[in-house]
Amino acid sequence: MTKELWGQVSNDLRKTVGKTNHETWIAPLEIVALKDGIVSFEAPTKFMCDWVSRNYGEPILSALRKTGAPVERITIGLGAARPVAPANTPAPAPAARKSARATEDSELPGAPLDARFTFDSFVVGKPNELAHAAARRVAEGGPVTFNPLFLYGGVGLGKTHLMHAIAHELQTGRPDLRVLYLSAEQFMYRFVQALRDRQIMDFKELFRSVDVLMVDDVQFIAGKDSTQEEFFHTFNALVDQGKQIVISADRAPGEIKDLEERIRSRLQCGLVVDLHPTDYELRLGILQSKADAYCARYPGLKMADGVLEFLAHRITTNVRVLEGALTRLFAFGSLVGREITLDLAQECLADILRASDRRVTIEEIQRKVAEHYNVRLSDMIGPKRLRTIARPRQVAMYLAKHLTTRSLPEIGRRFGGRDHTTIMHGIRKIDELMATDQQLAEDIGLLKRLMES
């Protein structure tokens, strides 16, 4: 009865968590007992026990309760659970399994590439010109003097676009190369599956036989010890063979908390490129490029002068929001048959414009303050207490408190994991100094204007 109950619940969870997550995290669980309101499961690895408990404990508990079962809590322990095979299907023989894996591996199953993300559709401006040039160089497929190429920046600044563009270009110009693109999360999933299925040697062979390895959002593996260990050895093996690696993250290697020092050091050995927040000219260029494509699609639709300039000035968060706003505007204009004017834009995009008015991020504040005071961003976030670093750090804390809605503990986490009392002290110190230090007051006024423009 217990296994029948779990089979029903497992199928329900597949619909809510998705096929991939279900196969990776839910299907390997083996139900052991239902006793005194406690449902006990076993998982094949300690890592999986911890991950499922932390990320899927509540959904599993909720799904069990929906069946009417008297469940108060669940426990997940280390056991000898086996991979789940389809019902009534005999397990394949070892030789057949090996053959199937070889076929799958030869296709290098990574993340799908977005056909829209090419170099032709990437709008180049001052904030991203170095990243674009470096990506172009890697996409040529020849020897590169920097390895890895590490791209970092906030959401919607073009990191993933450039990585997809590199992969597209290599597939077209160098079809002889084995190129594998995937997210850090997918790297971890495949690693965990290999552990679960006792296929770790196949995993190593796959990832260490590629010519170009591209891993998106590498900050995801920070704090995950086993995955970091395997990533480090994969990285070393590829570099030793002269293979190219391209990595992206939301921050520089030195600013990724809980990333092992040896990995951080390796990542910093290549070319580390920051994709800066877009400036007005780049945002306008992106809008003009998108608008040209939309006008070709809607030939009878007219756009008044000044609309693109208005959007480029008002929506400064990231390119995804900017492009989404333009898409909505053209769709609305075509559906109601009206010319796209400033009034229509303000009416149609009221929610986006409101959200963009005060969407200043802590990361943006940190970058702007570091640039203003000519200090390294990693030093400002790090533990150094030199006055030349401590004062800019306090200014950034002060601005983060007044220009964002983040709590003091959250601000503390973004400043190297500092306690909220440290943040409070820094804010009070700046408040006191501004009353007597005219230069400091002017600096903060200037920085506020930069953030809010």
Image (spheres, helix red, strand yellow):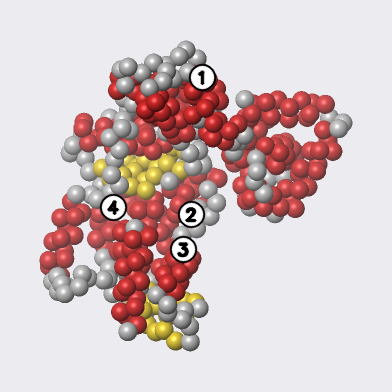
Q: Position of residue 245 (x, y in %)?
A: 35, 42
Whole-Å distance between the Cαs marked 3 and 2? 16 Å
First in residue order: circle 2 vs circle 1: 2
Write the residue at 37% across / 34% down. Answer: 161
Q: Where is residue 424 in the image (x, y as percent from the top left)?
A: 76, 48
Other-residue count near label 4 (Cα within 10 Å), few / some / many at <14 / 14–19 / ≥20: many
Mark 3 or 1: in front is: 1
Assess whether mark 4 and mark 3 are in contact (beta carbons under 8 angstroms). no
Whole-Å distance between the Cαs marked 2 and 4? 19 Å
Q: Position of residue 300 (x, y in %)?
A: 32, 17
Pointer 2 residue:
222
Amino acid type assigned to the residue bearing label 4 in the image: Phe
Amino acid type assigned to the residue bearing label 1 in the image: Leu
Pointer 4 residue:
207
Mark 2 or 4: in front is: 2
Q: In which quarter of the image is the C terminus?
A: top right
Pointer 1 residue:
342
Q: Is mark 2 on a helix, strand or loop?
A: loop
First in residue order: circle 2 vs circle 4: 4
Pointer 3 residue:
55
